[in-house]
Image (spheres, rainbow, N blue to C red):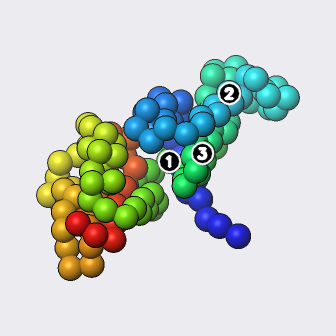
Amino acid sequence: MRTSPFLLFDGNCAEAMEFYYKCLGGELTLTKVGNTPMKDQFPVEKHERIIYAQLKGDNFDISAADWMASPILEPVQGNTTAIYLTGNSYSELKPIFNSLANGAEKDERTFMELREVPFGVYGQFIDKFKVSWVFRGETA
């Protein structure tokens, strides 16, 4: 058994997952509502939305979708989920941290530059898609 994050976006799932793909590499799969047998269950205006996305690499697996619920329920992103990215060292994590932090909120309450801490290396931020990222490395 393993765990993997599942992220919900509000119409920009493809853009977000392509950004993560550019930063992390791996294999990206994007499936639009309109390309599935379920398309008739959704209004035409939702056919371009992503019903399922997966970004999979040797050491990560991120799944996502666009919000499909009724307008009564509004998606709230960034404050209930995070992606925890671990690695061996600062030098391994720093390039990925910098790529993903491009466009991130720089609020001192939510942004912590990747740096040495008593338990190794740590950093965090909320990216431009309102997704929280937490980084941890074993050594500086």
| Front in this rendered view, residue 45 or 115 | 115
Left or right of residue 128, residue 116 in this image: left
- For the residues labelled 3 and 2, the Cα–Cα distance comes to 18 Å
Check disc 2 and give the amino acid type. Answer: Lys
Seen in the image, is 28 located left or right of residue 24? right
Q: Measuring 62% from the left and 42% from the top, which residue is drawn there?
A: 54
Q: Position of residue 42 (x, y in %)?
A: 74, 30
Residue 109 % position (x, y): 18, 61
- 38, 101: nearer the viewer: 101
Marks 1 and 2 sit apart, C-alpha to C-alpha, by 19 Å
Instruction: Read off the residue under disc 3.
Output: 56
Q: Crowding near pointer 1: few (<14 within 10 Å), some, many (20+)?
A: some
Name the one closer to the observer, 124 or 78: 124
Q: Against 32, is 122 above or below?
A: below
Residue type at tag 3: Lys
Q: Which residue is at the far right?
A: 37
Instruction: In the rendered view, tell whether residue 122 sits above or below residue 56.
Output: below
Q: Residue furthest left?
A: 108
In x, y percent, where is residue 98?
Answer: 26, 44
Q: Which mark is residue 32?
A: 2
Q: Earlier in the sequence, mark 1 or mark 3?
A: 3
Looking at the rendered structure, which numbered label has been put on residue 75? 1
Amino acid type assigned to the residue bearing label 1 in the image = Pro
Location of the C terminus (image quadrant) = bottom left
Does any portion of residue 72 appear in the rendered image? Answer: no
